[in-house]
Amino acid sequence: MNNDVSVNISYNETPHNGKPISMMKISPNGLILVTYSEDDKTFCVWKVESFKKVIESKRLDRLDDQHIIFCKNKESNIVDMCINDEKDKKILAYIDDEHKIKIIDMNNGLQEIKLNFEME
């Protein structure tokens, strides 16, 4: 991903470095949740069942090894995002405040999917 950083997290890391969650979206089938923190510019992708366990334990500082946290380019903020939960096609898409659309392939090492189109 250009200017993005992928981070493998351990069980004891705190999502969003303890910063508040600014935005939250759930996938169409309700299996995956993505949270975004404007303060530290990170995304956290959760399995909904795991997230429920975290909430029930009232411990948002505990993650398991199935969560993904990554940082985006720190120069802009996210204005909207969505995620899908298809088995072989987990995709995160977001729009930043510069009206740039980014599409991230969650099944392929967080690679950015480039679109070939022109806007008039």
Image (cartoon, rainbow, N blue to C red):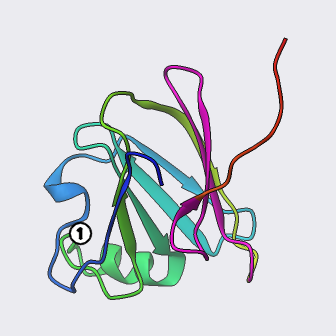
Asked if residue 16 is positioned above or below residue 59 in the image, the reply reads above
> Element under label 1?
loop
Q: Position of residue 50 (x, y in %)?
A: 43, 83
Is residue 59 found inside the magenta-colored segment of the image?
no
Circle 1 residue: 60
Amino acid type for the residue under numbered disc 1: Leu
Is residue 106 found inside the magenta-colored segment of the image?
yes
Q: Position of residue 118 (x, y in %)?
A: 82, 24
Residue lying at 83% horizontally and 32% vertically, measured from the top left: 117
Q: Nearer the viewer, residue 66 or 31?
A: 66
Q: Nearer the viewer, residue 83 or 55?
A: 83
Residue 17 occupies which quadrant of the picture?
A: bottom left
Residue lying at 74% horizontally and 73% vertically, measured from the top left: 89
Q: Nearer the viewer, residue 88 or 32?
A: 88
Image quarter where the C terminus lies is: top right
Residue lying at 41% horizontally and 75% vertically, measured from the top left: 51
Q: Position of residue 24 (x, y in %)?
A: 48, 50
Asked if residue 76 is positioned above or below residue 35 in the image, the reply reads above
Say whether residue 23 is left or right of residue 40. Answer: right
Residue furthest toward the top? Answer: 120
Say whether residue 58 is left or right of residue 99. Answer: left
Start-end of magenta stretch: 88-111
Say whether residue 73 is left or right of residue 107. Answer: left
Asked if residue 53 is positioned above or below residue 77 in the image, the reply reads below
Q: How many dots with numbers?
A: 1
Asked if residue 106 is positioned above or below residue 66 in the image, the reply reads above
Residue lying at 32% horizontally and 78% vertically, measured from the top left: 54
